[in-house]
Image (spheres, rainbow, N blue to C red):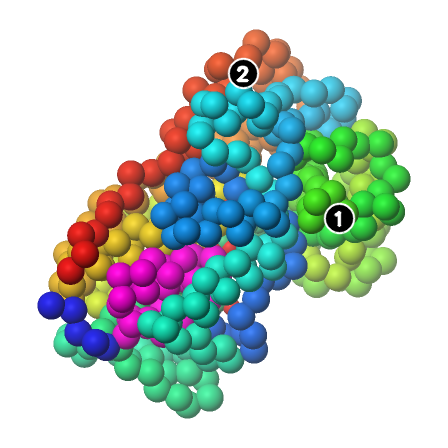
Amino acid sequence: MASSDPILIVGGGLGGLTTALALARHGRPVCVLEGAPQFGAIGYGIQFGPNVFHVLDRLGITEQVLAIADFPVALRMMDALTGMELIRVPTGASFRARFKYPYIVVHRIDVHNVLLDACRGESAIELVSDAMVMGFEDRGDGVAVTTVDGRTFSGAAIVAADGVSSMFRQKLIGDGDPRPTGYVAFRTIVPMAELKADVARDCSALWGGPGMHVVHYPLRHSSEFNIVAVFRTATHGERGDAAAYRAELENTYRNAHPSIRALIGMLDLRWRRAVADRDPIRRWHKGRVVLLGDAAHAPLQSFAQGAGMAIEDGLCLGELIAAAGDDFSSAFRNFEAARVLRTARLQLESRSLWDFYHLDEGIARDVRNATVADWDEAHLFDCLSWLYDGAAIPVAAER
Ligand SMILES: Cc1cc2nc3c(=O)[nH]c(=O)nc-3n(C[C@H](O)[C@H](O)[C@H](O)COP(=O)(O)OP(=O)(O)OC[C@H]3O[C@@H](n4cnc5c(N)ncnc54)[C@H](O)[C@@H]3O)c2cc1C
């Protein structure tokens, strides 16, 4: 029998909100504690593969997400030096026939708002912003967390969805900071009307080159354009000024295709982040506390699937807690059993793909380009099916 104590979810990102919704749909009380002053995402684009729709469907929010989405006609990989197209995954009718759902790109704020609206419609969910959790206690028969401003929240269990730099992971696993890659990312959204670069506006594109790549795609029904530039640098831990960042970008992309150099010129230099991931681990829980999403298994963004995994996690964990009542040990073990290998595969394959994108000029790069020239649609769909076919997520019986 489940107690009426709430499940405390720390972190109101896409993983935390999905978990809240999944639990509330089973009538389980939930309290989501978000450290930021308001619930809301950083305002950049995000890509969702068809696997994410398996979750959105079950939560009943597919239509709302489709209404705010753009539908790229293809996923393309270009050689950042020559501009040659290396890989093209068409995402039209054949893709939908194969994977049952579309590939979409959305503004993070818009998709966050869909989830928030759904959460606000559930009386079982309490959303608390400005609640930065700094400590917790597992008392065996319940849990409590404390916030930096001295508040205490009690509950039945804790779901730590507190992101790649998770404080809970540090306390539960103690494996240190996220693994730095030596790469940094700049992200920018520009009005489509201001885009002068000679690049396709209707696809999700990745231009890969030696130690650098650029991703771009349309947003908000093609009224905006999302640009992400990622590159290796010795200054990844340093904070520079705009002039230093600009000089570094000009130098890094000096041999890139002119279209890419035009995009680099449009970057907003105020947002720069070091790129990091986590090593896969087998255990994500201890007692009544469990990690979820990036806190458990942050990947590199090579497949654009970190949030997709956090969303799959959220439904899976919600169903398993609902099925197990207050037997959290069983729910959390089943959660790990259901999710560890899929998410670990993403972490490991993301690292391989990262290296594949960034090959230096030389024979390995020539081999890559010659190899992918033989990859047709059927082969590419087969390569992606482990990911895009979705995960087996249990359905809890009504209690
Ligand atoms: C450049 C880039 C591009 C990406 N593109 C994609 C993409 O296209 N598709 C995709 O699926 N994924 C993408 N990702 C990955 C994706 O952003 C993450 O995997 C995803 O956001 C993880 O969700 P989460 O809910 O686990 O954590 P987060 O989104 O990090 O949310 C954690 C939340 O917890 C809060 N928090 C943290 N600590 C505390 C605390 N102590 N107390 C209270 N609250 C706290 C934070 O404020 C935040 O709201 C990309 C990542 C990067 C860096």
Q: Residue at x 81, y 45 (%)?
A: 192
Q: Is residue 12 above or below residue 337?
A: below
Q: Which amino acid type is shown beneath numbered disc 1?
A: Glu
Query: Could you say which is closer to the camera, residue 44 or residue 302?
Result: 44
- In terms of secondary structure, where does tag 2 sit? helix
* Residue 20 point in image, percent of width and height: 37, 64
Q: Residue at x 21, y 52 (%)?
A: 396
* Residue 27 point in image, percent of width and height: 27, 66
Q: Is residue 233 visible?
A: no
Label number found at residue 61:
none
- In terms of secondary structure, where does tag 1 sit? strand
Q: Residues within 10 Å of mark 1 (few under 14, many from 20)?
A: some
Displayed quadrant of residue 127: bottom left
Q: Residue at x 65, y 20 (%)?
A: 86
In the current view of this chain or complex, which residue is farthest to the bottom?
A: 150
Q: Is residue 234 left or right of residue 192?
A: left
* Residue 136 point in image, percent of width and height: 31, 77
Label number found at residue 377:
2
Which stretch is magenta? 6-32
Q: Is residue 271 visible?
A: yes
Q: Which amino acid type is shown beneath numbered disc 2?
A: Glu
- Quarter of the image that includes the C terminus: bottom left
In the current view of this chain or complex, which residue is farthest to the left?
A: 1
Displayed quadrant of residue 151: bottom left
Label number found at residue 224:
1
Q: Is residue 39 above or below residue 214?
A: below
Displayed quadrant of residue 344: top left
